[in-house]
Image (cartoon, grey):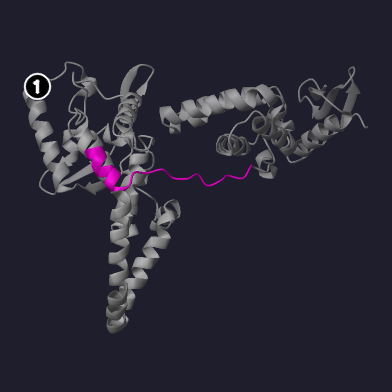
Amino acid sequence: MSRRVGQIVSRGRRSWLVRVFLGRDRETRRRRYHNRTVHGSARRAQEYLTKALRERDLGRGLEGSEITLNEFFDRWLNTAAKPKLREKSYRSYESLLRRYIRPSIGERVLSAITPLDLQSAYQQLSDRGLSPRTIRYTHSVLRAAMRQAMRWRLLLQDPTDGAQLPRLGRREMRVLSAEQSRTFLEAVLRTHYGSVFALALTTGMRPSEYLGLKWQDVDWERGTVSVVRTLEKVKGSWRFADTKRDRSRRVIKLQERVLQMLKGLQARTSQRCKHDSPDAADLVFTTANGQPINSDKLAQRFKAILRQQGLPSIRLYDLRHTAATLALSAGVPPKVVAEQLGHASAAFTLDVYSHLLAHMQQEAAARVEGLLFPQSRSKSMQRKAPQRAGLGVRKREVVS
């Protein structure tokens, strides 16, 4: 191959030196080359040379050919990801790359990464038993990094475009029924955290949202609460952060019973000496000694109550899904539920809770039939009444 274009020089078994001619130095007039050692087959070395020449011909710098994927990750995390991510999200990004991507292809040259490399890395994760959800999340983080590399003019193409991801099965949603929710409330209202769980179950707020509430967020006259921040623990200390998304900032109407609980809680809190730490100042929900509530410990308490009451084992976060399911089942318009949950649209809410669609369509059909054919509906109800009564008797006989 012409020296002025590029060279591939063998440096041993499956090791190649790739040289790309960059022109002459303006002052010394000496030839300038970009050198990179590529490990693998001769075909891999040729692919790297072709890509490097392409970048050179388009007038791009070859910095992407001079740094490894690990080096790029370090730069991306510190300069692009960290400033715009919440601390929890940043730690998640860093952990996913460190555990699942860096060990397999982190030492590869950034510009030499191919879709096949990523496909092989994802297959290794699948062979290790990682769930499709984890692999897809890792892919989304890697995709964000590669898109930034393109904006920084380090790459011509996004290698994540050609990767095929494992199919994400629809996870069965686990929630409490209306009867189970009543049993749960009766049990928790006798504990210190009763008002916390009652608010979670009736508003559908995220744990980080209701644990970050301050008394100033409660509008007593309108009976509402404003979601404007979250509470998280970072490196042993508490800090407030922005909500998950801009649309997560919302105003939620409180049920009258929950509003009365909060008034009672505020009265008890004002009588108790305030904690001298600013971390818990003005928080609505605190521990018995005035500290912010740790969501992990609250989840443990939640699980213990479920076991004591013989209720299904669900996650603390599933109280949010329970609240939405109860509201939709009660006939609350999806648009209202979407606003309460902070969803982007009612369509997204219905997609998440699609298991309720059949029930909602049946109810809607029955109501429209009552408007259009009132006599037919009346006769239908008369025919069904004896049958329902009979079923009820048989049910009671079985239970007894």
Query: Camera-side residue: 352 or 380?
Result: 380
Asked whether, in this view, residue 173 is left or right of residue 202, the answer is: right
Residue drawn where x is 30% and y is 49% of the image: 399
Q: Quadrant of residue 97?
A: top right
Instruction: Name the residue furthest right.
Output: 1
Q: Amino acid at mark 1?
A: Arg
Q: Residues within 10 Å of mark 1 (few under 14, many from 20)?
A: few
- The spot of residue 363 in percent (x, y) is 34, 66
Q: Quadrant of residue 48?
A: top right
Asked whether, in this view, residue 25 is left or right of residue 80, the answer is: right
Asked whether, in this view, residue 124 is left or right of residue 57, the answer is: left
Q: State which region is magenta.
A: 166-185
For the N terminus, which image quadrant? top right
- The spot of residue 77 in percent (x, y) is 53, 27
**Residue on which disc 1 sits:** 272
Query: Camera-side residue: 158 or 211?
Result: 211
Specify whether residue 178 is painted magenta.
yes
Specify whether residue 349 is painted magenta.
no
Query: Camera-side residue: 297 or 226?
Result: 297
